[in-house]
Image (spheres, helix red, strand yellow):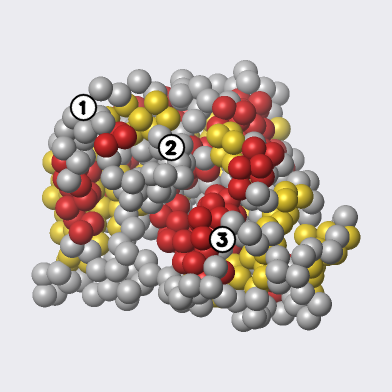
Amino acid sequence: MIAPAQSLVIVGSGLAAWTLVREFRKLDAQTPITLITRDNGDFYSKPMLSNALSSGKTAAQLVSATSAAMAHQLGVTVMTKTDVTAIDPVACSVTTALGPVTYSRLVLALGADPVRLPLQGDAADRVISVNDLQDYATFRAQLEGAKRVTVIGAGLIGCEFANDLVQAGYEVDVIDPGTHPLGRLLPLEAGQQVQQALAHAGVRFHFGTSVQAVLAAPQGLQVELANGHRLASDLVLSAVGLRPRIALAKAAGLQTARGIVVNRQLQTSQTDIYALGDVAEVEGLLLPYVMPLMQSARTLAAHLAGQPATLRYPAMPVVVKTPAMPVVVSPPLADAQGSWQVNAFSDGVDARFVGSDGTLLGFAIAGKATGQKTVLQKSLPAVLA
Amino acid sequence: MKVWQCIVCGFIYDEAQGIPEDGIAAGTRFEDIPENWECPDCGVAKADFEMVEIG
């Protein structure tokens, strides 16, 4: 397939890819866009994957627009079920099973793969992760007839799933080597409040240990923990983080670190190739959340439309959808100097990370205190000024 | 008064409550929120992702 001389090719069809298309079309209605995706390209709400169960939403119900509808509405050619296997930066083309596709500018919106811990046992391959709509459909299918679910990881995604599952009536065990839920986001006291609320809702936490093996049992699965405990389970869900899909870029000689390295125009080390979303590492920052993605997509859209644009990140609090104890957290930057001041009360916690001069540098609020979000957000420094 | 939900992140906008701390008074209809408003949780533009009426 030979694309027109000025053509934008986007690989991926997640929130990053579709948001870029929308934002770009606001500025440029003419330039041909081809979107190449390995799945079916439907537009759906990614953040809802971890809280759609208790509201009874099926995978199909999470689709807000099919890829055909998006293609028509936005004037895009969509190549579905198509893997991109190589990039040739010299010839400006990508390799697919349907032949090469040439680009004048290429955007890699490849996303990230769930990290999978090495596990022993004859049922280790039955552990699932939910990172896209197809995974969610699989998850729903496997929950049919299941009663007990083990969640590996008590981070944001693990906690959201645990809350959703327990609310939907399942027995839930959560295993994490740390000391409290949302360990990388919350100070201990705040994490403990979340733990109490989730435990009250029925979640059983196992901290300070890890899953060693998953074995087939006469009924369901047996999960063996490093501390010697054994759990009977019907389904094991792994939620231990994301790893950007950098292989394609690396093979093409683009600069990569944890993600594909891009500048403030989302441009990779190769002229005319860009990266966006969970795969992109901007000035050392990998932020797999919606708000940074929106900022990035708008900046890249403007840049591709020929307008001067530089990516800036304001403070971007992350909302953790755990209805048992809602949390909003804006972690201090990695190099921030200061300390947590935690004020815990019966139905929430207000934790603020304050610098030596009294400046607010981060916060973690839960329960009733989440009402402070807007006020606190306004006084935080920018993440990327 | 209606309740609306962001189709990307699930944020709920309840017209009866408004978002007073963000300058949107209680009782503000969704259509009366400025067009440059963005979802406070995920940053999606009002114009792009219409809120779904859920109540």
Same chain shared by disc 2 and disc 1: yes
In the image, what residue type sits under mark 2?
Answer: Glu
Of A375 and A323, the residue lying toward us = A375
What residue sits 59% from the left and 56% below the top?
A: A29
Identify the residue position indicated by label 3 in the image.
Answer: A28
In the figure, is residue A173 to the left or right of A348? Answer: right
Mark 3 against mark 1, which lies toward the viewer? 3
Of A358 and A281, the residue lying toward us = A281
Cβ atoms under marks 2 and 3 closer than 8 Å? no
The chain letter for the residue carrying disc 2 is B
What residue sits 59% from the left and 67% below the top?
A: A275
Q: Quadrant of residue A359?
A: bottom left
What residue sits 45% from the left and 52% below the top?
A: A290
Of A323 and A108, the residue lying toward us = A108
Identify the residue position indicated by label 1 in the image.
Answer: B16
In the figure, is residue A88 to the left or right of B45? Answer: right
Cβ atoms under marks 3 and 1 closer than 8 Å? no
Whichever of labels 2 and 1 marks the residue nearer the N terminus, that label is 1
The tag on residue B50 is: 2
Q: Position of residue A24 (x, y in %)?
A: 54, 59
Mark 2 against mark 1, which lies toward the viewer? 2
What residue sits 42% from the left and 44% below the top?
A: B47
In the image, what residue type sits under mark 3?
Answer: Asp
